[in-house]
Image (cartoon, rainbow, N blue to C red):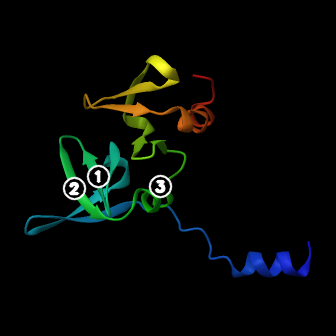
């Protein structure tokens, strides 16, 4: 390893550890949401919606920041605007053009786009 490469590695901030909980406001209350409770995350501009059962909590963060904060073995980016908790997935349904519908235990249906399909395949250990 060259001296420049070693310096670049030292200059990089360490990866952020996965969060185990998030603090969200719900009206006058502050709620602590454990990462494992989150079924899916939806991009909403400079915010994300944390979908927990039938509830949705807004958190000021981008979808890319949330992807870095969530445990990569438990959560998968399935679309440019959504991340899903793999434990919440009930089934995948093939649709036209190589995309999939992702059915969650809550009844929510999300879209797995072709561009994120390979990543999901690696996580689940097989081809879709």
The residue depicted at 58 percent of the width and 37 percent of the height is 123
Q: Name the residue under label 1.
A: 50
Most extreme residue toward the front is 97
Most extreme residue toward the right is 2
Q: Mark 3 points at which residue?
A: 67
Q: Name the residue under label 2.
A: 57
Q: Is mark 3 on a helix, strand or loop?
A: helix
The residue depicted at 53 percent of the width and 65 percent of the height is 17
Q: How far is the residue under mark 1 from the one under mark 3?
A: 12 Å
Mark earlier in primary sequence (2, 1): 1
Q: How crowded is mark 1: few (under 14 residues within 10 Å), some or many (20 or more)?
A: many
Give residue 106's position: percent from left, percent from top.
25, 32
Give the vertical position of 46 relative to 114 (above or below).
Answer: below
Q: Tally the numbered discs.
A: 3
Give residue 63's position: percent from left, percent from top.
41, 56
The residue depicted at 89 percent of the width and 81 percent of the height is 3
In the picture provided, is 40 more to the left or to the right than 79?
Answer: left
Q: How far is the residue under mark 3 from the one under mark 2?
A: 16 Å
The residue depicted at 52 percent of the width and 22 percent of the height is 98
In the picture provided, is 118 more to the left or to the right than 62?
Answer: right
Mark earlier in primary sequence (1, 3): 1
Q: Residues within 10 Å of mark 2 (few under 14, many from 20)?
A: some
Q: What element carries label 2?
A: strand
Occupied quadrant, residue 105? top left
- Kindly indicate whether the residue at mark 1 contacts the one at mark 2 (C-beta within 8 angstroms): yes
């Amino acid at each position: 390893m060259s001296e420049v490469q070693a310096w670049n590695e030292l200059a990089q901030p360490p990866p952020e550890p996965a969060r185990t909980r998030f603090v969200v406001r719900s009206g006058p209350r502050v709620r602590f949401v454990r990462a494992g409770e989150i079924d899916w995350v939806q991009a909403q501009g400079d915010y994300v919606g944390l979908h927990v059962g039938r509830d949705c909590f807004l958190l000021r963060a981008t979808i890319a920041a949330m992807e870095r904060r969530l445990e990569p073995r438990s959560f998968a980016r399935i679309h440019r605007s959504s991340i899903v908790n793999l434990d919440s997935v009930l089934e995948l349904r093939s649709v036209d053009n190589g995309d999939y519908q992702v059915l969650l235990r809550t009844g929510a249906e999300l879209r797995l786009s072709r561009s994120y399909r390979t990543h999901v395949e690696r996580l689940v250990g097989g081809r879709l």
